[in-house]
Amino acid sequence: MDVCSTYNRFGKDVCQSKAIPEPTLKKLSADINSNPEWSFVRVYTDEGISGTNTKHRDGFNEMIADALNGKIDLIVTKSVSRFARNTVDSLTTIRKLKEHGIEVYFEKEAIWTFDSKGELLLTIMSSLAQEESRSISENVTWGRRKQFSDGKVSLPYGQFLGYRKGADGLPEIVPEEAETVRLIYRMFRDGKSPSFIARHLTAQGIPTPGGKKVWQAQVIESILTNEKYKGDARLQKKFTTDFLTKKQKVNEGEVPQYYVENSHPAIIEPRAWDEVQRIMRQRKASGKRHDCSSPFSGRVICGDCGAVYGSKVWHSNDPYRKVIWQCNAKFKNEEKCRTPHVTEERLKNGFLEALSILHENRDTLLNDIRDVKHDLEDCTAVDARITELTGEMEVIAGLIQKAIEDNATHAQDQEEYNRHYNELADRYDKLKKKLEALEQERDERHFKSDILSGFLFEMTEYDYLDAEFTDSRCIAMLDHVTVYDDGRMVYSFLNGSDITVMV
């Protein structure tokens, strides 16, 4: 007995309804049941899914699996474009079906795949369908980029914590979610790591942006580095490289990017956001991995071997509980480090002692910091050189383009062409390296200036008569503290000052 399955894909470009229209179902069923040699199996559909790729088309893939398993020997579909808009997918699938004795009939084009002319017609029709899909994709891409160039901001609200789409189409703050965002930023500024924050939010039962129960450190990092939380928007961070595979890549200059300031209400103050970026860069630059459960994590150094101190809890289950810090490599080397362990309370008090000593020359110190900040922020010469190099690179890029076009339109000595091309390419690469070095220098100057800004703020706010230890102050001011075997603790501050106190 011949078995027949009808397949039709109803995308948004065919029908706005998510259900298959009843008249269509009746017509399909009637057409099949009117043929005495056919037996109707079922209708397979993919609702509102693009036909450019079969990967996520569950209905299509289920139909092919049923056919290959012997449940179907004839597939009736509305048209070539409803079957697949990717020529490769279309032909590959049909050839696989033919190998198993399964025929496909395309009603609109009257194509039978077992017919001798079927594959040729199918190739032509699939190519046309593919070009139609390419045109649609390019139009959508153009529309999106036009929105970007006009500064129109759109967020993936279903996966974005803190905002929803407002009545005017712009991002609107969700108060309860915004509190979670502020908590994440506050904990990070207080010295906690993304992993620690993720565990805390999970323990508190706070749902993730996607509504899940368990937070991941990567999600915390993405929230901490997203400029949209300070009210700005960098548009077109990624772009689609292939309309068929829908593969995306990070935009590294291949297509224009747009940065829109004050595009929507901010959840995090710009100064706080900038401080978080500074702390993030500082931690990455240190190359040290630590939990950051304490402001001293990764900042206490052994004066004997140079290893980092780690925290340990003594008497964790009795009233004498205390946290002590000890060289992590103390018992790893042949000769045991002679540096003493230090309690966390002593580290905090030592920081306040060192800070009070630093405060004795407060006015001179603040003036020196302001002078250094002014020098760091003056990037006039660097910016001028960057502009000059960028201009030179544009000229050489134009010469390279002209050389390529001339070679394509006029007969040339290819050896001479390659020599000329390689010379231009080498010049471009050398200029590019110089440009990258200058941009790195400028970034480092801004980075150091940001560090001093945080230090300057805390020093200005500090009152030695009413001094209390705070995690945020320690993080903003202290680079590290070195413990020596003679009991000295040298506090190295971010402005370059070293202050010694005793254990």
Image: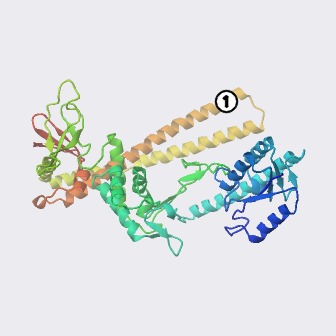
Q: Position of residue 456 (x, y in %)?
A: 24, 55
Q: Is residue 301 above or below residue 495?
A: above
Q: Position of residue 21 (x, y in %)?
A: 73, 69
Q: Position of residue 25 (x, y in %)?
A: 77, 67
Classify mark 1: residues with Cα within 10 Å, few (<14), some (14-19) or many (20+).
few
Question: Which quarter of the figure has residue 329?
Answer: top left
**Which residue sits furthest bottom?**
167
**Which residue sits furthest right?**
116
Left or right of 37? Residue 344 is left
Residue at 69%, 28% (x, y): give it: 416
Of residues 428 and 149, which is closer to you in this image? Answer: 149
Question: Which quarter of the figure has residue 222?
Answer: bottom left
Residue 377 visible here:
no
Of residues 82 and 68, which is closer to you in this image? Answer: 68
- Location of the C terminus by quadrant is top left
Q: Is residue 190 above or below residue 297?
A: below
Determine which residue is flagged by label 1.
Answer: 418
Left or right of 60? Residue 341 is left
Residue at 35%, 42% (x, y): give it: 285
Residue 261 visible here:
yes
Q: Position of residue 211 (x, y in %)?
A: 45, 61
Left or right of 364? Residue 37 is right
Of residues 160 and 48, which is closer to you in this image? Answer: 48
Residue at 25%, 51% (x, y): give it: 475
Callout 1, which amino acid? Answer: Asn
Residue at 73%, 56% (x, y): give it: 133
Question: Which quarter of the figure has residue 173?
Answer: bottom left
